[in-house]
């Protein structure tokens, strides 16, 4: 009787204080609608009227304008469905320019060039305080020799997240280029890139001089039509803490399918790379590696991949200065390597572990040390024995998709006391 539960009151105050701290920089958000018969008939007019954190819903239609975003944490969304709101540039500028240090979400647009095919979406870089999310867009026909569908030269994006997911890029010279992250998360997944012939996908300097950036480059599909020539389909450079390159499909006359170079440049040691369940067909160099342990030891696992009908299945230029370091662990295992002109070429003097792979024949690969082998050819300094006597078969375990919009762990931490408050007092 008469119990005022001072402990529960104190806990409630703690919860309120915590939520205020978490959302201190969040102001009440508004939704602005663009389209025929709406208050805003151009997207730029809505952007100019928007405040931090607002959402701009764009209805079906063709919008001829070059957009400049200088307000933080805006969401631009094609409200009637993906690609139903089309933005076509009108001048020689980039179609959408996002100012330095700004978070933004661009969701569901079809983006076309204007008078000059410069860049579809250009982010000026800088350290953002909110995520950058580019999702569900179709960006096409940026075929100028220096054009990109998406370009971001961060000058380092710190302590935040970058998501480029479920976009379609087609008929363009170059696809996506992103450079420079520190202590962040990077997700480039489930994108389709068709006939982007020079550099469809380049992701570089992951956690350069940082303390840990985790990156996922997963489940992308990069193809060239018959008769088209390309340079490098997927390029990943200067990876640091943990980088996963998985489930990607590359096919067409690219000089290189997947190129990974300068692993472990200046970041956290060891650099950890996992490459699995990728499939590369019909290229010059299926998977190419250069400086796999560049400035520090690395842990490199390449497994369950399919390399078929390439000039070279796997090609190593060099292992790097730390290639023979005791802490460096480089393993190629349980890959299907068949029908290539050369299955595995190691240009370094350090021997690499390539045991338990399928070389297209039960007799194993073609090499002087395996007189009866009739499978794909391997070079010296490749440890290929034992080998698989049949190809591995992939289980049906589709990827988890994009991770944009996850709830803040700090917010979850402050929800914990709520459970205590709701418990019945005894």
Image: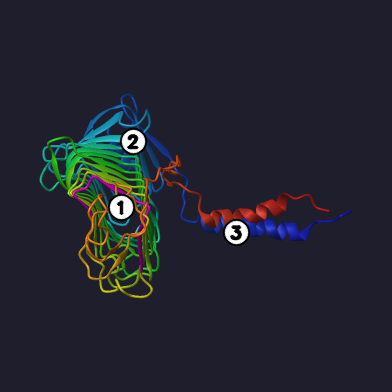
Residue 337 shown in magenta = yes
Position in image of residue 24 (x %, y %): 50, 56
> Of circles 3 and 1, which is in front?
1
Residue 118, quarter of the rendered image = top left
Query: Relative to 259, is 242 on the left or the right?
Result: right
Residue 263, quarter of the rendered image = bottom left
Label whose residue precedes the other's in the sequence (3 or 1):
3
Position in image of residue 378 (x %, y %): 23, 57
Residue that label 3 marks: 17
Which residue is outermost to the right? 1
Disc 2 crowd rating (10 Å Cα; few below 14, some 14-19, many 20+) is many
The stretch in magenta equals: 329-344
Whole-number angstrom distance, CA of label 1 to CA of label 2: 48 Å
> Of circles 1 and 2, which is in front?
1
Which residue is outermost to the front? 372
Query: Relative to 12, is 307 on the left or the right?
Result: left
Task: Choose between 275 and 243: the one closer to the eye.
Answer: 275
Q: Is mark 1 on a helix, strand or loop?
A: loop
Task: Choose between 279 and 157: the one closer to the eye.
Answer: 279
- Residue 205 vs 133, above or below: the answer is below
Residue that label 1 marks: 364
Q: Is residue 187 visible?
A: no
Position in image of residue 290 (x %, y %): 23, 63
- Residue 377 vs 175, above or below: the answer is below
Label whose residue precedes the other's in the sequence (3 or 2):
3
- Residue 195 vs 239, above or below: the answer is above
Query: Relative to 400, is 357 on the left or the right?
Result: left
Label whose residue precedes the other's in the sequence (1 or 2):
2
Residue that label 2 marks: 108
């Amino acid at each position: 009787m008469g119990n005022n539960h001072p402990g529960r009151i104190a806990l409630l105050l703690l919860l309120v204080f915590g939520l205020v701290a978490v959302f201190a920089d969040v102001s009440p958000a508004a939704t602005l609608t663009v389209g025929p018969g709406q208050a805003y008939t151009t997207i730029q007019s809505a952007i100019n009227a928007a405040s931090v954190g607002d959402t701009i819903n764009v209805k079906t239609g063709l919008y001829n304008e070059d957009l400049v975003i200088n307000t933080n944490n805006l969401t631009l969304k094609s409200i009637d469905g993906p690609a139903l709101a089309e933005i076509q540039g009108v001048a020689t500028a980039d179609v959408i320019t996002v100012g330095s240090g700004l978070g933004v979400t661009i969701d569901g647009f079809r983006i076309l060039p204007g008078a000059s095919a410069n860049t579809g979406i250009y982010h000026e870089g800088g350290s953002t305080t909110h995520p950058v999310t580019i999702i569900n867009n179709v960006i096409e026909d940026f075929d100028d020799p220096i054009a990109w569908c998406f370009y971001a030269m961060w000058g380092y994006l710190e302590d935040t997240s970058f998501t480029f997911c479920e976009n379609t890029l087609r008929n363009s010279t170059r696809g996506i280029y992103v450079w420079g992250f520190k202590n962040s998360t990077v997700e480039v997944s489930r994108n389709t890139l068709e006939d982007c012939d020079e550099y469809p996908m380049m992701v570089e300097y992951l956690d350069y001089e940082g303390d840990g950036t985790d990156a996922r480059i997963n489940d992308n599909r990069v193809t060239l039509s018959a008769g088209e020539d390309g340079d490098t389909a997927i390029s990943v450079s200067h990876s640091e803490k943990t980088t996963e390159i998985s489930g990607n499909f590359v096919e067409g006359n690219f000089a290189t399918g997947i190129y990974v170079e300068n692993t472990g440049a200046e970041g956290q040691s060891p650099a950890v790379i996992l490459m699995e369940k990728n499939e590369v067909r019909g290229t010059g160099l299926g998977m190419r590696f250069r400086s796999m342990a560049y400035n520090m030891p690395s842990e490199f696992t390449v497994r369950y991949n399919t390399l078929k009908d390439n000039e070279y299945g796997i090609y190593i230029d060099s292992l790097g200065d730390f290639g023979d370091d005791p802490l460096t662990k480089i393993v190629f295992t349980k890959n299907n390597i068949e029908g290539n002109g050369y299955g595995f070429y190691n240009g370094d003097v350090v021997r690499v572990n390539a045991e338990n792979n399928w070389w297209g024949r039960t007799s194993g690969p073609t090499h002087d040390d395996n007189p009866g082998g009739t499978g794909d050819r391997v070079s010296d300094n490749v440890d290929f024995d034992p080998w698989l006597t049949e190809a591995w078969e992939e289980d049906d375990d589709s990827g988890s998709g994009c991770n944009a919009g996850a709830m803040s762990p700090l917010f979850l931490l402050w929800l914990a006391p709520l459970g205590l408050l709701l418990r019945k007092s005894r």
